[in-house]
């Protein structure tokens, strides 16, 4: 069964859920507003440049999960979905997920953003399979640490192949949709790489290699 793999941030979403979650924490007064906002902006710039230290970022991004009750976080996430995520869910992304499902492809969201933030978003798109960075949980509480390897750059390939080993699904003939040059390692692995509203670096590579370039934006 071929896979249809979808990046989430700036691909299925017309925005970045990880960055927006940080903005939401500032908005709710759950973090030191000025310092957190400055760091959130810096990490996002590093990501776009391809210079992000993923472990430094995760130490920053996962700490608020450890500082808040899990039930309270789930309630906050519902508000976050309504205010920040539902408005940026792309219609074309939904349609393409449905098209692949009707063709018998297994749809998967694969994202560097942690599964606390992205799990409900993937389900809102009708996708049950999520491969993401996993926050560590002990006794029902987030620790602020990452479990296993981050699902970022080549880590996406490692996480995907671990998932394939668990599910027994064949990777041959698969698709991957992404906006970011950070996803070039996985785009180079699939039979059908698609650049979606790509950044400048990915657009140049896609054009050079003859990959499909498309847009999910209205």
Image (spheres, helix red, strand yellow):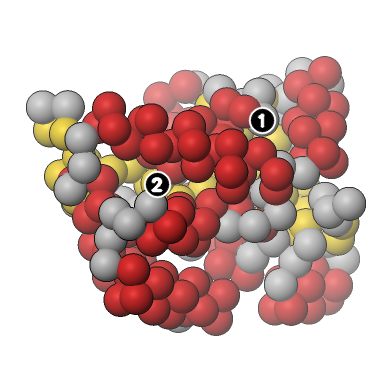
How far is disc 2 from disc 1 in space, using C-alphas? 17 Å
Q: Which residue is mark 2?
A: 114
Q: Quadrant of residue 123?
A: top right
Q: How many marks?
A: 2
Pointer 2: residues within 10 angstroms few (<14), some, or many (20+)?
many
**In this picture, residue 149 sits left or right of residue 6:** left
Pointer 1: residues within 10 angstroms few (<14), some, or many (20+)?
some
Q: Does any portion of residue 123 appear in the rendered image? A: yes
Quarter of the picture containing the N terminus is top right
Q: Residue at x 29, y 54 (%)?
A: 30
**In this picture, residue 35 sits left or right of residue 45:** left
| Farthest-out residue, left | 139
x and y, in percent, of residue 172 in the image: 67, 36
Q: Is residue 50 above or below residue 58?
A: below
x and y, in percent, of residue 187 in the image: 65, 57
Q: Earlier in the sequence, mark 2 or mark 1?
A: 2
Q: Is residue 173 above or below residue 38?
A: above
Element under disc 1 = loop
Q: Residue at x 38, y 52 (%)?
A: 28
Q: Which residue is mark 1?
A: 125
């Amino acid at each position: 069964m071929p896979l249809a793999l979808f990046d989430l941030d700036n691909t299925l979403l017309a925005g970045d859920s990880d960055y927006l979650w940080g903005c939401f924490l500032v908005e709710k007064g759950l973090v030191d507003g000025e310092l957190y906002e400055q760091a959130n902006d810096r990490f996002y710039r590093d990501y776009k440049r391809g210079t992000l230290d993923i472990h430094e970022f995760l130490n920053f991004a996962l700490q608020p999960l450890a500082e808040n009750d899990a039930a309270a976080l789930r309630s906050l996430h519902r508000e976050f979905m309504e205010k920040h995520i539902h408005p940026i869910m792309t219609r074309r992304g939904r349609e393409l997920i449905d098209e692949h499902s009707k063709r018998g492809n297994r749809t998967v969201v694969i994202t560097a953003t942690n599964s606390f933030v992205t799990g409900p978003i993937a389900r809102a798109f009708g996708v049950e399979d999520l491969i993401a960075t996993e926050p560590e949980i002990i006794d029902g509480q987030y620790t602020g640490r990452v479990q296993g390897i981050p699902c970022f750059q080549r880590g996406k390939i490692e996480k995907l192949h671990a998932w394939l080993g668990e599910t027994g699904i064949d990777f041959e003939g698969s698709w991957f949709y992404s906006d970011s040059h950070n996803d070039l390692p996985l785009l180079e692995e699939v039979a059908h790489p698609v650049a979606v509203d790509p950044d400048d670096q990915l657009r140049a590579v896609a054009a050079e290699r003859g990959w499909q370039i498309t847009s999910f934006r209205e």
